[in-house]
Amino acid sequence: FFCCRMAMKMLRPKVLPKVLAQANTSGVKTTLLINNEGSLLAYAGPDIGNDAVGAIVSNIWSSTEGNEQLEYVIMECEQGKVVVTRVSEVLLCLIGSDLAEFGMLKAKANSLRQYLEGPLSEVLL
């Protein structure tokens, strides 16, 4: 018999950009956290028109909301390669350079989603 105790992750607003910035390696330029209306909540990396990107990504995601099994939207655009996934009630968007591999973007998005899911679900109740 043994006992497991899970430590609760706390999410501090000042730390969120630093957490997002951890994904900005290996070709990832910018990482965004966007609400359902397309407003930017947090980002890490250069501003490449992040407000406009957030609105567009949110619109694309909402057009696919009927698909219950959708986990990712993967696309290529002027800014580079983009992977979007839902984390709790918000969208996580990774924008990579043209040289970034979609598999790497998706893996980083998945890792960040797993890390942020608990803390964001607590904040966004």
Image: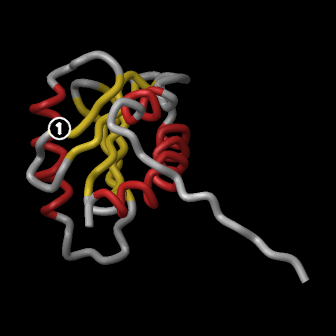
Q: Mark 1 points at which residue?
A: 40
Q: Which residue lies furthest to the top in this view?
A: 46
| Image location (x, y in percent) of residue 35 | 18, 50
| Image location (x, y in percent) of residue 36 | 15, 56
Residue at image x 31%, y 57%? 123
Looking at this view, is 73 or 38 the one in front? 38
| Image location (x, y in percent) of residue 72 | 37, 57
Reply above or below: 37 against 118: above
Left or right of 108, for residue 39: left
For disc 1, the neighbor class at 10 Å (few under 14, some 14 to 19, many from 20) is some
Q: Is mark 1 on a helix, strand or loop?
A: strand
Q: How many labels does the image show?
A: 1
Reply above or below: 71 against 78: below
Q: Quadrant of the C terminus?
A: bottom left
Reply above or below: 99 against 5: above
Left or right of 79, for residue 112: right
> In the rendered view, how is the structure colored?
secondary structure
Residue at image x 15%, y 61%? 62
Q: From where the camera sits, is residue 95 visible?
A: no
Q: Which amino acid does label 1 sit on?
A: Leu
| Image location (x, y in percent) of residue 95 | 34, 31
